[in-house]
Image (cartoon, rainbow, N blue to C red):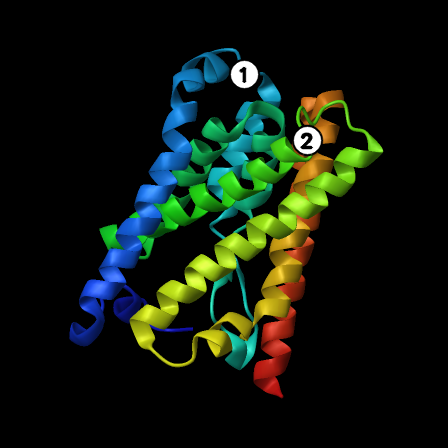
């Protein structure tokens, strides 16, 4: 994993391209989010207990991100996406992006991320959620509840769209910052991250369906999330020992 201090800046020879790219992603994120903001207040005002449990757990979950094991370290996988995606499936795109941004800010502050990096990450999430939402809407996966068999397939496709969008956006930013081969950066840790991210997104569909039956099923998802976290940590420790 590249040092945080380096990821917070750009080399002089690539400053224009790097920050221009960040600005483009941030602008795209705003373009995705702004049309949904008018419905944000009514959604939050009438949100049930399940929504607030998901929102709180999204804020807490990112204190323990999943990190790519060993020498292949390239990016962290943030469990808050599970709750954000479930919120999107149930209450819409705008509120999901806002919750995801709120979950990202404490982590960015604690690790002293530069403002540009934090804004890019929020924009990247917004565009990724927008891609997934577009797939859901275009293929007839919305409204998600009640769940039909065709919606499960559509959510799987939307999850892949979310991951591909996010992975390509982040990989391109890393390429512009550090140079090297773009394809190599895209491929590095892609398999591990795909399994982790898509697994979280599919778990979000289960969470959304469970929350429809009882809000108190929402905290239960912490158990499998913790199991995945421990598995990732043990894998990392074993590779380092080897």
- Looking at this view, name the residue that lies furthest to the left: 12
Q: Are marks 2 and 1 in contact (CB under 8 Å)?
A: no
Q: Residue at x 49, y 75 (%)?
A: 183
What secondary structure is found at the residue carrying circle 2? helix
- Residue 239 location, quadrant: bottom right
Quarter holding the C terminus is bottom right
Q: Considering only vertical position in the picture, is 169 above or below 70? A: above
Rendering coords of residue 94 (x, y %): 46, 28
Residue sitting nearer the eye, 29 or 206: 29
Q: Which residue is mark 2?
A: 208
Q: Considering only vertical position in the picture, is 38 above or below 19? A: above
Rendering coords of residue 108 (x, y %): 34, 51
Q: Residue at x 66, y 40 (%)?
A: 204
Q: Considering only vertical position in the picture, is 30 above or below 78? A: above
Q: Which residue is mark 1?
A: 47
Q: Which mark is residue 233?
A: none
Would you say 1 lies left or right of 30 here?
right
């Amino acid at each position: 994993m590249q040092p945080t201090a380096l990821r917070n800046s750009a080399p002089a020879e690539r400053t224009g391209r790097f920050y221009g790219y960040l600005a483009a992603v941030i602008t795209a994120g705003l373009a995705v989010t702004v049309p949904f903001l008018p419905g944000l207040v009514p959604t939050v005002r009438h949100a049930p207990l399940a929504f607030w449990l998901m929102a709180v757990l999204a804020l807490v979950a990112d204190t323990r991100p999943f990190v790519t094991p060993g020498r292949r370290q390239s990016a962290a996988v943030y469990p808050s996406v599970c709750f954000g995606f479930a919120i999107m499936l149930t209450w819409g795109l705008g509120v999901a992006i806002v919750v995801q941004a709120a979950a990202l800010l404490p982590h960015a502050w604690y690790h002293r991320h530069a403002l540009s990096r934090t804004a890019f990450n929020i924009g990247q999430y917004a565009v990724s959620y927008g891609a997934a939402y577009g797939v859901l809407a275009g293929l007839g996966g919305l409204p998600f509840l009640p769940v039909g068999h065709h919606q499960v397939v559509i959510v799987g496709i939307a999850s892949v769209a979310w991951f591909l969008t996010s992975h390509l956006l982040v990989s391109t930013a890393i390429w512009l910052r550090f140079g090297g081969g773009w394809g190599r950066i895209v491929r590095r840790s892609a398999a591990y991250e795909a399994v982790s991210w898509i697994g979280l997104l599919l778990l979000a569909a289960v969470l959304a369906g469970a929350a429809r039956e009882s809000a108190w099923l929402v905290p239960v998802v912490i158990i499998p999330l913790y199991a995945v976290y421990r598995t990732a940590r043990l894998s990392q420790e074993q590779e380092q020992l080897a």
